């Protein structure tokens, strides 16, 4: 998530964080289905309308860092070093996300998600949205120039890599194994002589 700079933005970010932390504590203490939006708002000492100004649905309270993850995936494409190939940059970001989501402290949260059809459905829709955002970032990079379907396909592979590795006995080794296959798939999209170009040079020539 972008770090807020102004006083108003910092206050909003602090309120959002308080709501999310309160919701997670209540969900883990009482069970996700046993806690309502009004319970969370009352415990966090905010109005229900304030809660909904930060989170569009109850499920979103569980995935508080959703927006930050989505931004990080796109930035792995847009902010990578000028000469850095695409796939290693994405692999590095997925490694970081998997480390975050497989920490010991995350285990109770994933058990809660796995036990809730509503949360599993929300997570699936979230992953599809992340894949669309990532695919758009890949397609928009002038140094890559893949077809739209190739960009979307690679993005889906990357998002699935995160989901599969998170559930593997050795998540980090799984990321590396899956990305070997993603690298091969990416190479199939390249024309003879293609490589990930210097994006700044491409923009200068445009």
Image (cartoon, grey):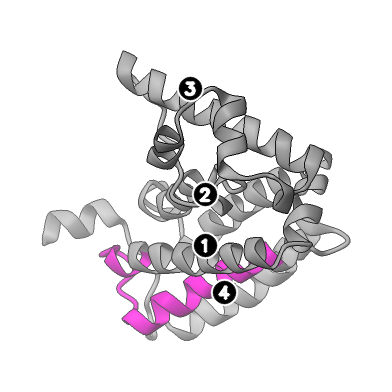
- Say what secondary structure mark 3 lies in: helix
Residue picked out by circle 2? 66
Instruction: Give whichever of discs 3 and 4 has the lower sequence position.
Output: 3
Mark 3–mark 2 CB contact (< 8 Å):
no
Q: Is residue 2 above or below residue 205?
A: above
Q: Quadrant of residue 173?
A: bottom right
In-front residue for pair 146/125 = 125
| Residue in the image at 48% along x and 31% along y | 16
Q: CA distance from mark 4 to mark 2?
A: 18 Å
Q: Is residue 7 above or below residue 139?
A: above
Q: Is residue 190 visible?
A: no
Q: Is residue 113 visible?
A: yes
Verify whether residue 156 appears in magenta: yes
Instruction: Give whichever of discs 2 and 1 has the lower sequence position.
Output: 2
- Mark 3 neighbour density, 10 Å: few (under 14) some (14–19) many (20 or more): few
Q: CA distance from mark 2 to mark 1?
A: 8 Å
Residue picked out by circle 3? 14
Instruction: Give whichever of discs 1 and 4 has the lower sequence position.
Output: 1
| Residue in the image at 31% along x and 57% along y | 198
Q: Quadrant of residue 119?
A: bottom right
Q: Which residues are magenta?
A: 138-163
Looking at the rendered image, the disc whose residue lies closer to the viewer, 1 or 4, is 1
Residue picked out by circle 4? 157
Residue picked out by circle 1? 126
């Amino acid at each position: 998530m972008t770090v807020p700079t102004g006083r108003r933005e910092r206050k909003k970010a602090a309120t959002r964080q308080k709501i999310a932390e309160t919701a997670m504590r209540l969900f883990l203490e009482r069970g996700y289905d046993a806690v309502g939006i009004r319970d969370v708002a009352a415990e966090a000492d905010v109005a229900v309308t304030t809660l909904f100004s930060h989170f569009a649905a109850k499920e979103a309270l569980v995935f508080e860092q959703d927006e930050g993850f989505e931004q990080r995936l796109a930035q792995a494409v847009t902010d990578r070093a000028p000469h850095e190939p695409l796939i290693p940059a994405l692999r590095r970001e997925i490694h970081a996300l998997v480390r975050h989501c497989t920490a010991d402290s995350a285990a109770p949260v994933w058990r809660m998600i796995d036990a809730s059809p509503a949360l599993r459905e929300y997570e699936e829709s979230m992953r599809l949205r992340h894949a669309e955002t990532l695919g758009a970032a890949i397609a928009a990079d002038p140094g890559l120039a893949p077809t739209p379907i190739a960009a979307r396909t690679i993005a889906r592979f990357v998002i699935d890599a995160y989901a599969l590795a998170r559930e593997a006995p050795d998540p980090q080794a799984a990321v590396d194994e899956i990305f070997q296959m993603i690298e091969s798939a990416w190479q199939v999209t390249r024309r003879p002589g293609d490589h990930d170009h210097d994006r700044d040079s491409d923009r200068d020539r445009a």
